[in-house]
Amino acid sequence: MMTKATPLWGDKPDVEVYGERLRDARLIQRLRSGEVAAKAGVSQSWYSKLEHAISTTLDWQKANDIATALGFSVDFLASPPVTAVQRGSLLFRAKKNLPKSEEDQLVSWARLVGDVIHAAEPRLRLPLLKVPRIPTDMGPVDAAFAARNSLGIPAGEPIPHLIRTLERGGVYVATISFDGHLHAKNHDAFSTWIGPMLDRPLIGVRASDSWERTRMSVAHELGHLAMHQARWEGDLEAEAYSFAAEFLLPSDALKREWPRNVTLASLVPMKKTWGMSLAALVEHGYRNGLLSATQRTSLYKQMSNRRDPASGERMRIREPGWRDREVERPKLIAMVAEKAFGPVRNLDAIEGKVFSWRTDFLRTLFSGQVTEWAKEVSDTADDSKADGTQVADVIPISSRFQAATR
């Protein structure tokens, strides 16, 4: 009597895998579909069909082969996608010629952040969203004024900590180190909307040692979020840049404090007060008619030719005052995760609660945050487990964030 052969993988049931999860697992690592297919022992055309299908039911061994080729778990591939970030929807403060593979990678990072927030938010009450919906016919200067007003920034006053101000207004900010072969290198920042209703703003900013560039990049992306959610035509980058300059330093204050004798040295006090680079101040002054084209060109040439005494680098690379502030880093995402998932000691304890995203990617995300919890879970890589599940109350953004200086 013949008996039915027992599969080597036992009686594990078939698995429904989701194309979006396959793409995220591959694109966040910038792998080619042919590489994954070869490692999994399947044809590239068949694998591509899997990625483009909403979902496909596979036997467990085939699903495990594909998961192994991707370096992710079967549980991740079988988790229904919840973060509706569409490829092509991201807005960038990017360097020129950003490859599509890097744009796709950033979308996958945005979806990772969205998944963490989606898993955590039902347990929390979060800050009221204060990013205004700017009418499509409003210009960048008026939009910046409206955004300052909505976020509760006093008129004509500097913004001491930009990221913290935005986090109090319900904006998620992720600082991620895009160095090495797993991370995109050719961008400064991106922004998009996450959440089931696409009602939670996210800014992703490249980890940098330049506090000036970080602040401008974040303000630039705020401009995209406020002005360009429903409009895609026009020179969006120029509008976002104008918004950022006006948001950081309103024109009325710029004109009031502009030095009579404009030199790089005379602009340094404004840089320290308003948290803008010399280059941004030069451009802002030129746009407001405070500098002639000849003066603007002269100042740029001086920055290209002169060297900062402290660093020895040319001022276009390392401006005077580059050590006067710490680079701003966010904390809201880590605060949300800590409140939602409890005082866990390592990321293995929450991996299953965030749709089985790999812990090394979670570690990269949380290492860009500045809470003690984020530092602890980012620095710990042991195999210990902790439950730590709890229902959190209100995140006290205002009181804790106002006192923060980092």
Image: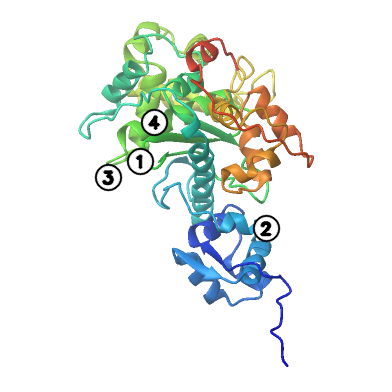
Q: How crowded is mark 1: few (under 14 residues within 10 Å), some or many (20 or more)?
A: few
Residue 197: image tag: 1
State whether residue 262 is above or below residue 182.
Answer: above
**Helix or strand or loop: what does disc 1 sit on?**
loop
Point out the tag, 1 or 3, that comes first from the N-terminus.
Answer: 1
Mark 4 or mark 2, which is nearer to you? 2
Label 4 vs label 1: CA separation?
27 Å
Q: Earlier in the sequence, mark 4 or mark 2?
A: 2
Amino acid bearing label 2 = Gly
Q: Residue 92 in the image: x percent, y percent? A: 44, 41
Badge number at residue 71: 2
Which residue is disc 4 drawn over?
A: 241
Mark 1–mark 2 distance (CA, rounded to whole Å) = 31 Å
**Image quarter (top left, top right, bottom left or bottom right) of the C terminus:** top right
Task: Identify which amino acid the numbered label 4 is placed on.
Answer: Tyr
Q: Is residue 83 left or right of residue 61?
A: left
| Residue plotted at (45% across, 25% down) | 125
Q: Nearer the N terminus, badge 4 or badge 3? A: 3
Q: Quadrant of residue 109?
A: top right
- The mark lying in front, picked from 3 and 2, is 2
Please tell me which of labels 4 and 1 falls first in the chain: 1
Q: Say if mark 3 contacts mark 2, CB within 8 Å.
A: no
Label 4 Cα crowd, 10 Å radius (few <14 / some 14-19 / many 20+): many
